[in-house]
Amino acid sequence: MTTFTSYTLDTAPAASQAKLAEVAQAWGFVPKLHGNLAESPLALTAYDMLFGLVAAQSTLTPIEQQVAYQAINVMHQCEYCTAGHTFLSRSVKMDEAAIAALRNGTPIPDAKLQALRVFTESVVRERGFVSDETTDNFIAAGFSKAQVLEVVTIAATKTISNYTNHLTRTPKEAFMADPALVWVAPRNRAKSA
């Protein structure tokens, strides 16, 4: 079995050290996802830039960004990112009912956020071949054509992180042991029962 290293600032490949130092400064630590991505300076830079662009330039609110991110995390069954984005969702003051709905696969009580979730899931599930009706419903819920493409950008960002976590078996962060953050993917629920 191929194993991957979750690099630190001291052990990262030379070409990834500067970007990993930027990540550490921004987050206050080196997330293990980023430590794994450091294996490829390209992958580390691509993920960090996309995530930063969404945070800085998206016209979706911070809560809406987290809805889209979390919808994808759950669809991709990424335990690491679902736990991490539960924390991030709380940090932007997302309603607990919306957080629970995203994690449990139940409808979000807020109709606009639910429309965003449905559209985001459709983009990922249908690989962009979303029906006109689904796109029209997204726009009718109060979103813009630009935000259609922002959801695609969020999907690209999450594809990098979710797939990296699956391929490299990224270890969870210590804070993710908090029972309020732990999320077990459906494929692992029989094992943990």
Image: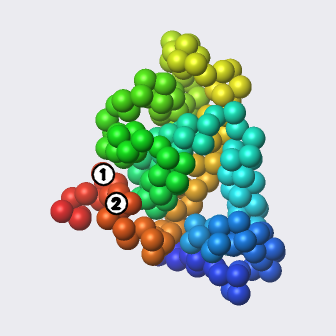
The image shows residue 78, relative to residue 107, as above or below, that is below
Q: Is residue 181 visible?
A: yes
Question: In this orientation, which residue lies closer to the viewer: 175 or 121?
Answer: 175
Question: In this orientation, which residue lies closer to the viewer: 148 or 59?
Answer: 59
Secondary structure at numbered mark 2: loop
Q: Is residue 4 left or right of residue 43?
A: left
Q: Which mark is residue 186?
A: 1
Q: Residue at x 70, y 38 (%)?
A: 58
Which residue does the numbered mark 2 point to in the structure image? 180
Q: Is residue 49 left or right of residue 138?
A: right
Q: Is residue 64 left or right of residue 95?
A: right
Q: Amino acid at mark 1?
A: Pro
Residue 168 place in picture, x, y as percent: 53, 68
Which color scheme is applied? rainbow
Mark in front: 2 vs 1: 2
Q: Amino acid at mark 2?
A: Ala
Question: In this orientation, which residue lies closer to the viewer: 83 or 72?
Answer: 83
Q: Residues within 10 Å of mark 1 (few under 14, many from 20)?
A: few
Residue 14 place in picture, x, y as percent: 80, 80
Q: Is residue 40 visible?
A: no
Q: Residue at x 61, y 22 (%)?
A: 143
Residue 1 place in picture, x, y as percent: 47, 75
Q: Are marks 2 and 1 in contact (CB under 8 Å)?
A: no
Secondary structure at numbered mark 1: helix
Q: Residues within 10 Å of mark 2 (few under 14, many from 20)?
A: few
Q: Residue at x 58, y 77 (%)?
A: 6
Q: Earlier in the sequence, mark 2 or mark 1?
A: 2
Disc 2 from disc 1: Cα separation: 17 Å
The image shows residue 4, relative to residue 92, as above or below, that is below
Q: Residue at x 47, y 52 (%)?
A: 90
Residue 128 place in picture, x, y as percent: 59, 29
